[in-house]
Amino acid sequence: MSWAKAVLTTVGLLLFTSTARGDTDTVLVRDFNFFPASLTIRPGDKVVWKFIQACCIDHTVTRTASPMSWNSGSLAVGETFELVFPTAGTFAYHCIPHQAIGMTGSITVEPIRASTLGWLGLFLLAASLTAAGIYVLGYKRQSA
């Protein structure tokens, strides 16, 4: 095993053990409400708003504040609107026609914590560093 392979193996294991992102969460839009009204996700997760109103009332999913403003436009039963949230923060939103009657919601994107590797990730990291150390020691013995 060459030095380059040992480094690539270590980098690969670090990438492999990082926490996967990209979950999808659903918010239902029905009866002048967002269900759930508050949702907590992680950076990189996608939120899909699904319009399931029983009748013929259109709604919007709108945020006018910075950062990350958006407007779904008027959507009817069966339609969806989706966004990926790349950064941490709290993002309040509303339905334009029904904000005055309390049709509001919020998405809280929690920051990624350094401790998200977990036990398996830490074990694989330690194993790869040990293997790299053994290789370096063996290489130094051959060179001497």
Image: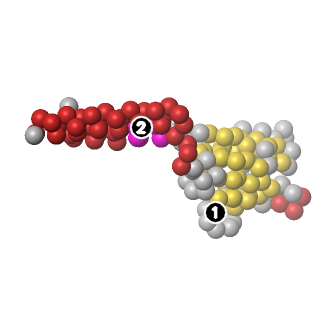
Whether 11 is drawn above or below 69: the answer is above
Magenta span: predominant SS is helix
Q: Which mark is residue 69?
A: 1
Above or below residue 41? Residue 66 is: below
**Between discs 2 and 1, the one toward the N terminus:** 1
State how many labels appear: 2
Residue 142: assigned label: none
**Can residue 140 be seen in the rendering of this structure?**
yes
Query: Which label sits in the foreground, 2 or 1?
Result: 2
Q: Secondary structure at mark 1?
A: loop
Which percent across, then down, holds residue 46? 60, 45
Helix, strand or loop at mark 2:
helix
In the image, which disc is placed on residue 125? Answer: 2
C-alpha distance separating marks 2 and 1: 39 Å
Q: Residue at x 64, y 63 (%)?
A: 69
The amino acid type found where label 2 is placed reads Leu
